[in-house]
Image: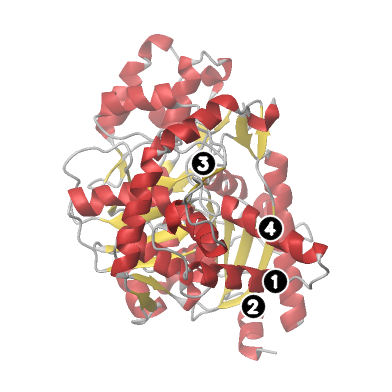
Amino acid sequence: MNTDAKSTIESGKAILGIEFGSTRIKAVLIDGDNRPIAQGSHEWENQLVDGLWTYSVEAVWHGLQDCYADLRANVRQLYDTEIESLAGIGISAMMHGYMAFDKDEKILVPFRTWRNTNTGEAAARLSELFVYNIPLRWSISHLYQAILNGEEHVGSIDFLTTLAGFVHWQITGERVLGVGDASGMIPVDPTTKTYSAEMVGKFDKLVEDRHFGWKLLDILPRVLVAGQNAGCLTAKGAALLDVSGHLKAGIPVCPPEGDAGTGMVATNAVRPRTGNVSAGTSSFSMIVLEKELSKPYEMIDMVTTPDGNLVAMVHCNNCTSDLNAWVGLFREYNELMGIPVDMNEIFGKLYNNALRGDADCGGLISYNYFSGEPVTGMAEGRPLFVRSAGDRFSLANFIRTHLYASVGVLKIGNDILFNEEKIAVDRITGHGGLFKTKGVGQRILAAAINSPISVMETAGEGGAWGIALLAAYAAGGRQGMSLADYLDQVVFAGNTGTEVKPDADDVAGFNAYIENYKACLPVEAEAVRCKKQNNQ
């Protein structure tokens, strides 16, 4: 038993981070040295309801409570003790989306997640109005699309927030949001580190003829930067989190953040000229900029770090889901043949064998579109594997093309940053499920964006660890330091991880693959047209 960890927990000095991911809610408990000492998790899935991707409010609370109960069980198993108090808590979740509530705190329509792509008209109009790229998944796009659709609930909105902001509000009573997550609601001004006054004014004027009983700032959360006071856990919040009743109220809770922000923190990528790539169910790259881009790009979102630095974000709705589904077939084959199944071994052998394939995948193409993909102009998606009779159809090429597909759209967006905008970076760090098999995901991503990729041992801890670090920073760990200095000097202490440089043949092969990929996008579009979702 780790007696130091037990003492940390019993003295109420541990820090808790909780992140709501796409398929898993994860809790991480860290000690005074920012090391994970316990964890819990809960698996969940989004639902397609009336054509929109959602998670119910009931699923949010059940998932949170089950995740925390799993954490408590882990603490009892490891240290034979109970969590009574904490030095800090942080809540993070999938960015963007739309959660609208009335004055009685009742949700007006089901939570509309980042995955929905039904906001094309609104996003296009707002992008033109603001002269700024407004993505489909941003909260302002969802709000304006609801207005354009004439949805009755809009006039009753009292509060509009994200998933992280909702959970934080319910456990603290505070209607606030970290600046990184807030920058995915409506653009943030990096000088004021709050919503752009110009764009807020333009939106209010745009909808003034609708005569709603609110102005935009009336319904949005107050914006906070990392380290600022975001409230404390209330008695109601403690009961929502810990149904056993052991957890006490009064614990400080840091500003809630999106998963992009916590990914930046977990990979020490909040300083200009650093970046990170998250690759799991969805993928996104975050490059912290030294200055504004020369012009808006539809494929690139401008957001901020948790301390307000400008970030160029390429967000892709799809990443490893299709790849995982194909690997699942090999698991079924093993089971059919009576061979013992170890998924880590299956992933490891298939991934490493893929590196023996042709650099251009032998002409094979995969589209991993479980849902729409805005970067390539797909409002909906259909997973699709394409080959010609003369292509080199081998197991290595087959898996390699699915690995390429997992970051193919990401490459398309990042080619703009590196080739057109000539953005300079000193370090890019990868994290997420794609990098679990050592070296393979790194090599594929390095080829995709022609840049060295580092992976840290802590990358597997992910966003829950990242929001725990933000909670530690807010709880007094910063000692007057900026967030970037705190991460450099206190958390990572010079550790930059293991680096893989791009292989020239891989880079050339990926470039050939992506040209083939882009040329065949009309095939994917036709599959969307011909094959109805869920065969309806």
Which callout, 3 or 1, points at the residue further toward the start of the chain?
Answer: 1
Amino acid on which disc 1 is placed:
Ile
**Residue 329 seen in the current view:** yes
Q: Residues within 10 Å of mark 4 (few under 14, many from 20)?
A: some
**Residue marked by disc 2:** 9
Q: Mark 1 or 4 closer to N-term? A: 1
In this view, 54 is above or below 153: below
Q: Quadrant of residue 132?
A: top left
Q: Of the residues tagged 2 and 4, which is closer to the observer?
A: 4
In the rendered structure, the answer to whether residue 417 lies left or right of residue 529 reads left
From mark 1 to mark 2, how far is it between C-alphas? 6 Å
Q: CA distance from mark 3 to mark 1?
A: 28 Å
Measure how far apart labels 4 and 3 are at the Cα level.
33 Å
Few, some or many residues within 10 Å of mark 1 (<14, 14–19, 20+): some
Residue 138 found in image quarter: top left
Q: Position of residue 87 (x, y in %)?
A: 55, 70
Q: Secondary structure at mark 2?
A: helix
Which mark's residue is nearer the viewer, 2 or 3?
3
1 and 4 marks in contact (CB < 8 Å): no
Measuring 54% from the left and 31% from the top, which residue is drawn there? 527
- Which amino acid type corresponds to the residue marked 3 in the rendered image? Thr
> Which residue lies under the disc numbered 1?
83
Report how far apart the C-alphas of labels 1 and 4 lie in the structure. Answer: 38 Å
